[in-house]
Amino acid sequence: MTAHMNQPTGHILIVGAGVIGVCCAYELASRGYQVTILERDAVGQGCSFGNAGLISLGHLPIPRPGVIGQTLKWMADGDSPLYIEPRLDLDLARWLWKFRAACTHDQLERSMDVMCGLSRLSEAGFRHFAQTEHLDFNFRPLGYYEVYLTEKALDRACRSADVTRAHGYAYERLDAQTIQDREPALSGDSVGAIWYPDSFFCDPYLFVREVGKLVRRMGVVVRENVEVQSFIEDGDAIRGVRTTLGESIEADHVVLAAGIWSQALAKKLRLRMPLQAAKGYHRDIPETDPPLSTSCLLGEANMVATPMSGHLRLAGTLEFSGVNLDMRRNRLNMLTEGARRYLPSINGAPPTSEWVGMRPCLPDGLPIIGWAPHHQNLFIATGHAMLGLTFGPATGRLVAESIAQEETSIAIDEMRADRF
Ligand SMILES: Cc1cc2nc3c(=O)[nH]c(=O)nc-3n(C[C@H](O)[C@H](O)[C@H](O)COP(=O)(O)OP(=O)(O)OC[C@H]3O[C@@H](n4cnc5c(N)ncnc54)[C@H](O)[C@@H]3O)c2cc1C
């Protein structure tokens, strides 16, 4: 086995069939590699299943100047979008410390350079899937609004939008009348909005499912209900993986794309990744009357309302309560209550879906897209936090370029695995 060599005939194992795993499979298969995806559950059933569907290009990372003050205010307010379960957890304490250190102007500028590079790659990637591969995933290149009920919050959001604009993604500030005319479903209480015309939205599960079907047609073996238990090590290389079914599967390269669960797998290789699960929820409800024409971030409530395949998806909240899928009803209810302030026509009809997912979050707000530090043929692609759907196509491209030893479309050094 020769690692890091351009060998399109090699066998690549991808662990995890979320948005990241399937996008990696697509790019690798396009280059002629033999690819197998191993998925513990079914394609797209992890965090990629029920997110808000926003392809938010040029979005700021969570760690940024000023966010600590906001975080402390939210922590003191039981009804805020942020919840940190009180518990003794040294890893979380270390994570918060590193997060605090990343809230600087310098780090924000570095992160924005990387994230806007990822955005541009993904922008082309989503258009390619929709227009060239003709995948049907409710792709809507219509931009999105950030809607505010107070001038203070709108002014603050404009300062963030200025950072986005300085990195090449335009925005427009709309007054109350204009946003009301464009989205009559919104309450007359909004003082205005920000319009990000370059972004998109889609149905995130449809996207993963359709890319999953496409890669199967391209010859990728997608094995569901197969859980990777450990790695077969051979000096500083990985020879393959062992599954809970007792199988050993050999590979020339392994891509770890198991979302929040990547951490537990990496630990088996003595590799520490400071990933924390930031839980979020969705509640799908019947469409408002009139329906929203495009996705809206409801500013003060810090949640998103996205019109999606015949219903309205309310999604948001940020909960640090460990790696588990326990649902807190009060957090779910907060979505409806928060949205009602902006969308008064939401009625009491029963939700059609309720869901919880875990965003894989690293403390500096950037993902890991890079080679493992001590295993020459293990590539890591995780930690995409709030932007995993957005950065899926870009990540797939960078992973495939790295494995094929092509020049990467953007520099990936800031996202290396050993930066912590
Ligand atoms: C409420 C909410 C709203 C969000 N909104 C947006 C949004 O609008 N836009 C956006 O860009 N992002 C959004 N996100 C973030 C986005 O959903 C995630 O960043 C993204 O889904 C992460 O994708 P992934 O492929 O890394 O992980 P996952 O989708 O979790 O996939 C990992 C897969 O690995 C599998 N796996 C785990 N362990 C093993 C194992 N041992 N063996 C085999 N398989 C394994 C899992 O079963 C899973 O299918 C949101 C998230 C939440 C929670």
Image (spheres, rainbow, N blue to C red):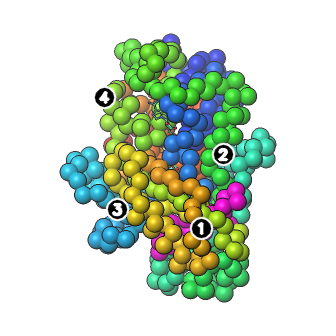
Residue under the image location 71 percent in, 34 percent down = 214
Disc 4/disc 2 C-alpha distance (Å): 34 Å
Amino acid at the residue labelled 4: Arg
Disc with the residue nearer the chain's start (4 vs 2)? 2
Which stretch did the figure color magenta? 294-312
Q: Amino acid at mark 2?
A: Phe
Q: Is residue 155 above or below residue 23?
A: below
Q: Position of residue 57 (x, y in %)?
A: 60, 58
Question: Looking at the image, can residue 401 be seen?
Answer: no
Foreground disc of the pair 1, 3: 1
Which residue is denoted by mark 1 in the rendering? 349
229 is within the stretch colored magenta: no
Residue drawn at the location 40% of the way across and 64% of the way down = 330
Disc 4 or 1, which lies upstream in sequence?
Answer: 4
Q: Which residue is mark 2?
A: 207
Judged from the image, the secondary structure of the residue bearing numbered disc 2 is helix
Q: Kindly report the distance in space between the C-alpha atoms of the residues bearing marks 4 and 1.
A: 49 Å
Q: Earlier in the sequence, mark 2 or mark 3?
A: 3
**In the rendered structure, are the residues bearing label 2 and label 3 in contact, judged by CB atoms less than 8 Å apart?**
no
Q: Nearer the viewer, mark 4 or mark 1?
A: 1
Q: Return the residue at label 4.
A: 270
